[in-house]
Image: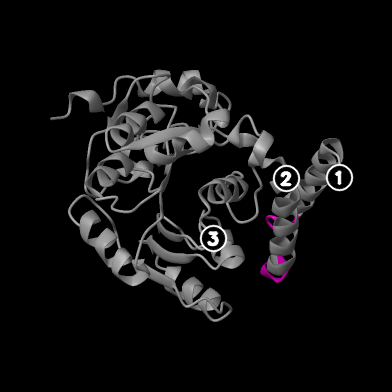
């Protein structure tokens, strides 16, 4: 099939997936099958990708991470990866679900969501793969290392770490050992700064809905995560089109991704418009206005941490 026809097919499949995305659970299998078709149809294009955003397919992930992860797994030849996902929510929209279904990936799910146990049991009963675990707890710097150890004990190894907790992400990631990890996915916050390597001040009970009325004071910038992870042997290879989730791979394998790597400046979403006003309603202000209302809040320059 020609490259042009593949692109047309992928666009049609992605549109079909989008129409099912917010539909009822009875369409779960249809969504999965469409996702498999979309991802398999674009694999022949992987050798010619010039940007990981070209691999995006949104099946169960938030912004196309399912397709990007398939591209990464194919490059690394990770057939059945083991994934620790911190901040998985209720497992409806996350980075590990499609890999668990499609690749029989081992997953260790962690969230403080009280409904996680019910969702876990529902999906566990439908999967043959027994390497499917969860822990319902709040993570902070005090227990991050132990959680990683428990996950590794259950899965044997951890190949992929995904973290999205809308708060202490930088500080928690800083405490995780990362032994054996090959791929890291982090949610970053471009509303904090255009280019500074900064993070919010650590608070063990961090709640973005209470820290600032805008709900935009949380996490860390892409540059902050880059500074942290490059110092620990990982390289940035790109982010989603929405400018939210960034992907890092072990630097030993970065040559496999040289053709897709762009400068971090290309991954700043300037039109998210997710901030809230002081009455709690969406304000629809742009990212420059978000940075303006956050500029006097306390931040930590990660390059100055001892």
Q: Is residue 17 left or right of residue 108?
A: right
Image position, residue 117 (x, y; %):
43, 73
Q: Residue at x 86, y 45 (%)?
A: 1
Q: Nearer the viewer, residue 31 or 262?
A: 262
Circle number at residue 24: none
Cα–Cα span, label 3 and label 2: 17 Å
Residue 15 to residue 133: above or below:
above
Instruction: Give the residue at mark 2.
Output: 44
Q: Specify whether residue 226 is painted magenta.
A: no
SS for callout 1: loop
> Quick check: marks 1 and 2 in contact, CB under 8 Å?
yes
Image position, residue 50 (x, y; %):
63, 29
Q: Are there few (<14), some (14-19), or many (20+) residues within 10 Å of tag 3? A: few
Circle number at residue 1: 1
Q: Is residue 211 left or right of residue 188?
A: left
User: Which label's residue is closer to the chain start, 3 or 1?
Assistant: 1
- Quadrant containing the C terminus is top left
Q: Is residue 24 left or right of residue 300?
A: right
Residue 288 visible? The answer is yes
Please give the range of residues in magenta. 20-27
Cα–Cα span, label 3 and label 1: 25 Å
Q: Residue at x 54, y 65 (%)?
A: 100
Instruction: Give the residue at mark 3.
Output: 79
Cα–Cα span, label 1 and label 2: 10 Å
User: Which label's residue is closer to the chain start, 1 or 2?
Assistant: 1
Image position, residue 68 (x, y; %):
58, 44
Q: Are there few (<14), some (14-19), or many (20+) residues within 10 Å of tag 1? A: few
Residue 214 visible? The answer is no
Number of numbered discs overlaid on the protein picture: 3
Q: Residue at x 51, y 58 (%)?
A: 96
SS for callout 3: loop
């Amino acid at each position: 099939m020609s490259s042009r026809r593949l692109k047309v097919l992928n666009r049609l499949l992605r549109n079909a997936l989008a129409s099912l995305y917010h539909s009822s659970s009875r369409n779960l299998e249809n969504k999965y099958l469409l996702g498999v078709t979309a991802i398999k149809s674009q694999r022949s294009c992987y050798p010619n990708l010039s940007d990981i955003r070209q691999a995006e397919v949104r099946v169960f992930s938030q912004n196309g991470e399912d397709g990007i992860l398939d591209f990464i797994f194919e490059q690394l030849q990770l057939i059945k990866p083991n994934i620790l996902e911190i901040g998985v929510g209720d497992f409806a929209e996350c980075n590990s679900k499609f890999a668990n279904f499609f690749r029989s990936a081992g997953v260790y799910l962690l969230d403080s969501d009280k409904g996680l146990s019910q969702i876990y049991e529902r999906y566990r009963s439908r999967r043959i793969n027994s390497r499917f675990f969860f822990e319902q707890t709040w993570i902070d710097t005090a227990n991050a290392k132990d959680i990683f150890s428990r996950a590794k004990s259950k899965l044997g190894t951890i190949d992929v770490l995904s973290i999205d907790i809308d708060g202490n992400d930088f500080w928690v990631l800083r405490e995780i050992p990362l032994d054996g990890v090959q791929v890291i996915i982090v949610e970053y916050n471009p509303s904090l700064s255009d280019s500074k390597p900064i993070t919010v001040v650590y608070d063990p009970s961090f709640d973005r809905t209470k820290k600032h009325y805008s709900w935009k004071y949380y996490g860390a910038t892409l540059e902050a995560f880059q500074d942290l992870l490059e110092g620990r042997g990982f390289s940035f290879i790109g982010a989603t089109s929405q400018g939210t989730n960034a992907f890092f791979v072990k630097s030993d394998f970065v040559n496999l991704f040289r053709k897709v790597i762009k400068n971090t400046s290309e991954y700043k979403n300037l039109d998210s418009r997710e901030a809230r006003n002081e009455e709690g309603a969406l304000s629809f202000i742009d990212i420059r206005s978000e940075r303006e209302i956050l500029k006097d809040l306390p931040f930590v320059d990660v390059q100055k941490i001892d």
